[in-house]
Amino acid sequence: MAILWRLAQDWIDFDTGMVLCAAEDFGCAGTGAATVGGRWNSVGTPVIYLADSLALAQLEKRVHTPRQPPRGMIAVEARLPAASLAAAHAVEPPEGWDEANVDWSVGCAESQALGDEWVKAGAMLLMRVPSVVVPVGWNYLLNPAHPDAKKVRTRRIEHRPDPRLW
């Protein structure tokens, strides 16, 4: 078994307070990335961003939410067959992939096009990409539409970030 990590929040219906998608439910996850776009996906392409450690997941969340920690953050441990991790599609990052302060919700950067094409091809569960935050760390995109996404087992872990990070 291989383990990857993410920090997420439950999607709550503001009118009723009901949970629409639990943070650990990969059956409905990927909507946030599809709504706002990301370094490796454009708006409209659902993916689930994961990190190779909980520490990297925390740093990634920190740089993307600079003002204050999100409320109700959950650590999600994703357990996958080791073969899925070993078979992850590794990309050669294009020029400019590591630019800072980019509004990923507009246009389509070359890194986004790579991720979108990978999702559309549907051949692999995971795509391995370098982290900008920790150059020796790896992030993984999980294609929630891939048939093997159902094999991923998740565990919800309550998480309270250290306030000194904010």
Image (tube, rainbow, N blue to C red):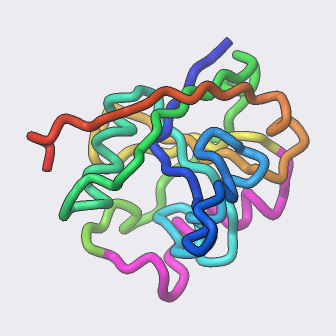
The one of 131 and 72 positioned closer to us in this rendering: 72
Quarter of the image where one finds residue 148: top right
Q: What residue span does the magenta drawing correspond to? A: 102-123
Q: In the image, residue 62 lies at what x, y percent?
A: 26, 50
Side (left or right) of 16 relative to 70: right
Residue 61 versus residue 56 in the image, above or below: below
**Residue drawn at the location 75% of the way across and 59% of the way down:** 119
Q: Residue furthest bottom?
A: 107
Residue lying at the far front of the rendered structure:
16
Q: Position of residue 54 (x, y in %)?
A: 39, 28
Depth check: give the residue in front, 163 or 4.
163
The extreme right residue here reads 147
Q: Is residue 91 above or below residue 46?
A: above
Left or right placement of residue 72 versus residue 121 in this view: left
Q: Quadrant of residue 56?
A: top left
Q: Residue at x 68, y 76 (%)?
A: 44
Spot occupied by residue 8 in the image (x, y as percentages of width and height): 49, 47
Is 53 displayed left or right of 2 in the figure? Answer: left
Q: Residue at x 46, y 64 (%)?
A: 39
The mark tally for this picture is: 0
Q: Name which residue lies at 79% across and 42% down.
A: 124
Q: Is residue 61 above or below residue 89?
A: below
**Horizontal and vertical percent for residue 46?**
69, 63
Q: Is residue 105 magenta?
A: yes
Q: Is residue 60 left or right of residue 66?
A: right
The residue furthest top is 1
Within the image, what quadrant is residue 84 found in? top right
Residue 120 lies in the magenta stretch: yes
